[in-house]
Amino acid sequence: MLAHLLPFIAPFRARVIGSIIFSFILAGIGAAQVGLVQPLFDRGLSPESTREEVLWLAGKLLALGILNFPARFFHFYWIRTAMEEATCSLRTSVFSKMQRLPTSFYTRSKQGQMISHIINDTRIQAEALKAFVDLVREPLKAIAYLSMAFWADWQLTLVIFVIAPFLAAIFQVSGKKVHRNQADVQREQGDFTHAVAEGIGAHKITKAFNLQKFVTQRFTYFQDRFYQAQKKTMFVEEFAHPLVEVIGACAFSAVIVFAHHRIQSGATSIGDFVSFVAALALFMDPIRKFSQANVKLSQAKAAHERVMELMNYEEEADKGSLEPTKFEKSIEVKDLTFSYGEGEVLSHFSMHVNKGEKVALVGLSGSGKSTLINLLLGLYPVDHGTILLDEKPIADIKLNSLRGLFGLVSQDIFLFNDTIRGNLTLGKDFTEEQISHALKVSYAAEFVDKLPQGLETIVGDRGTRLSGGQQQRLTIARAFLQDTDVLLFDEATSALDNESEKVVQKALESIASQKTVVAVAHRLSTIQDYDRIYVLSQGRLVEQGNHSELMAKAGEYAKLYDLSVKS
Ligand SMILES: Nc1ncnc2c1ncn2[C@@H]1O[C@H](COP(=O)(O)OP(=O)(O)OP(=O)(O)O)[C@@H](O)[C@H]1O
Ligand SMILES: [Mg+2]
C-alpha cells in the first residue's frame, strides 16, 4: 500500500527522509534526558554537591531542551505537511477519476459515500505515511528508554520484559477490533453525509410539505447509526487504556518491593532507581504509539482498498478514434434497443435527422425520450442497434468530440454557485459582445440587465436565487454561446408558467434558427413547424410525420395534441 502511495509521496521525499533522521535525534534526546535523572537525584539534589555540579546539570538539561525544539518541530511539521499534501494529490486523482466514470456509476452510487471517499478515505490512506514514520520513531524511543533502564538497573529491567508482551497483546487485540470496526464507521459516515446533503437540498420541499419532523428523524436515524458504529470503537479503546494502567500499576508495585530490597542491600542507588522508574514510565508511551501506528496502518490499508475499488472502476468506454469538429450530414438511429438494466426502455427505435432539420420527440412520461437524448450524447453505451453520426457509428467517435457537437438544454437545470458570467462561459474565453449577444437571443438580457450586479450576480446554490424561467434562459444562453452544430432540447419548458414558457420558447426558437435540432417536446403547440415528429410509446416508435400529417391520422399524436392543448 505504501508502494501505491509512492507516487504521491515522491515530490516531498526530502521531508520524509528529514523527518526520519530527526526520529533518531529525538530518541537520542529522550535517552539523554533520562540519563540525567540519576546524577540529578544522586548528586544534584544532595547537600554535598557543589555549585558547579548543579550548574553543569542544569546546563545539560537546558541544552537538551533547546535541541529538542528544532528536532520536534521539523520532525512533526515535515511529516504532517507531507501527509496533507499527499492527501491533496490523492484526492485530486480520485476526483479526476470520478470525472471519467460512466453515467451509470452516478445513478447507482450514493452521493454521501462518494464525498466520503474523496474527503475521508484519501486522508486515512495518506495517514499511512505518518504511521510509517511513527513505526520508525517509536521503536527507536523504546530502545532508547530500555537501554537507559538497563543502564540504571539491569535486573529491574527484566520486569519490563515480563510486562511488555502483555502490553503489546492488549494493544494488538484492541487495535484489530478498532480496525475491523472502521469499515462500519466509514460506511455509516457516508450514509450520514448523504442524509445531511439530502436534508439541505430538500429545504423547499421540507417547508412546503411540513417535513421538518420527517427530515430531522431521517437525520437523527443516520446520525445514531454513525454514532453506534463509533461507540464500539470507543468502548474498545477506553477499555484498553485502564487495562494497560492496571498492568503498569502491577509492574510498579513489583518494582518497588524488589527495589526496596536492592536499595537496602546497596545494590542500587535512589538515583538509579528513579532513573529506572522514569525510563519504565516513558517506555509505555512508545509501545502505545507503536500499536496505534499499526492500527492506523491497517485503517489506511482498508481505506486504500475502498479508494482502489473506485480507482479500478471501469471508466466510460471511449474507444473511438474519430475526432469530427463539425456536423456535416445526418444523425441516424437504427433499430435501437436499450435497457438500463431490467426491462427495455427503447425497443427497435429508428429515426433520422438531416443537417438543418428540426425533429421532435413526443410521448407520455417514461416513454424513453430523455433516454434517447442520453444515448445520442454517448452517456450510455448502446446495447443493440446503432446510432450513426455522419454515417459513422458514434462508438467510433471520441466522446469529447461527439459531445462537442451537441449543445444541451436539459430537463434538469444545473447552474454552478457562481456568477452569471461564470455560468455562461464555463471557463472558456468569450468576448463581451459574444456574451451580450447570447443573453439577447436567449431573452436573458431583459432580466440580467436589471440586476444591480448584472453579469457578476451570484446565482446561488444550483441557481436558486433566480426564477425557474430565468434559470432556463441562462442555460439556453449557455448552449448558444458554446455554438454547437446540433441542439438537444429536453423539455426545457415543462416546469414553467405560460408567460415564462412563452419567453423561453421564443429563446429556444431564436437560438435554434440555422441549427439542427432534436427536441423533446411537451407542449405540442411549439413543434407545429418541425420537419418531423417521432411519437414514442413505451419505448416504441408508434407514429412519425409532420404535424399536419400526424393530425390527419387521428392516432396517438392527435390524442396527445388534444391533451396538450387542453392543459
Ligand atoms: N438511470 C436510470 N436507471 C434505470 N431506469 C431509468 C433510468 N433513467 C430512466 N429510467 C427509466 O427509463 C424509462 C424512460 O425514462 P425517460 O427518462 O427516457 O422517459 P421520458 O420519456 O424522458 O419521460 P419524461 O417525459 O417524464 O421526461 C422510465 O421508465 C424510467 O423509469
Ligand atoms: Mg424526460
Image (cartoon, grey):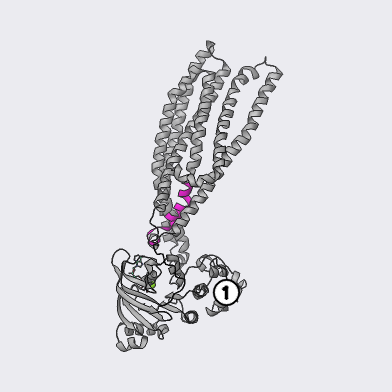
Q: Is residue 149 left or right of residue 331?
A: right
Residue 255's spot in the image, x, y percent?
48, 20
* Label 1 CB sits under 8 Å from any ligand 2 atom: no
Is 279 located above or below residue 134 in the figure?
above
Residue 122 painted magenta: yes
Work out whether residue 211 or residue 412 is closer to the camera in this orientation and state it: 412
Q: Residue at x 56, y 34 (%)?
A: 21
Q: Residue at x 54, y 40 (%)?
A: 16
Main SS category, magenta section: helix
Which residue carries the number 1 mark?
Answer: 435
Q: Is residue 455 above or below residue 56?
A: below
Residue extending furthest toward the top: 265
Q: Quadrant of the N terminus?
A: top left
Task: Report the residue at 45% width, 56% height from top.
Answer: 97
Q: Position of residue 225 (x, y in %)?
A: 40, 50
When asked about the image quadrant of residue 101, the answer is: bottom left
Along the viewing direction, whichever of 487 and 10 lies nearer the viewer: 10
Quarter of the figure with the C terminus:
bottom left
Residue 143 screen position, x and y as percent: 51, 27
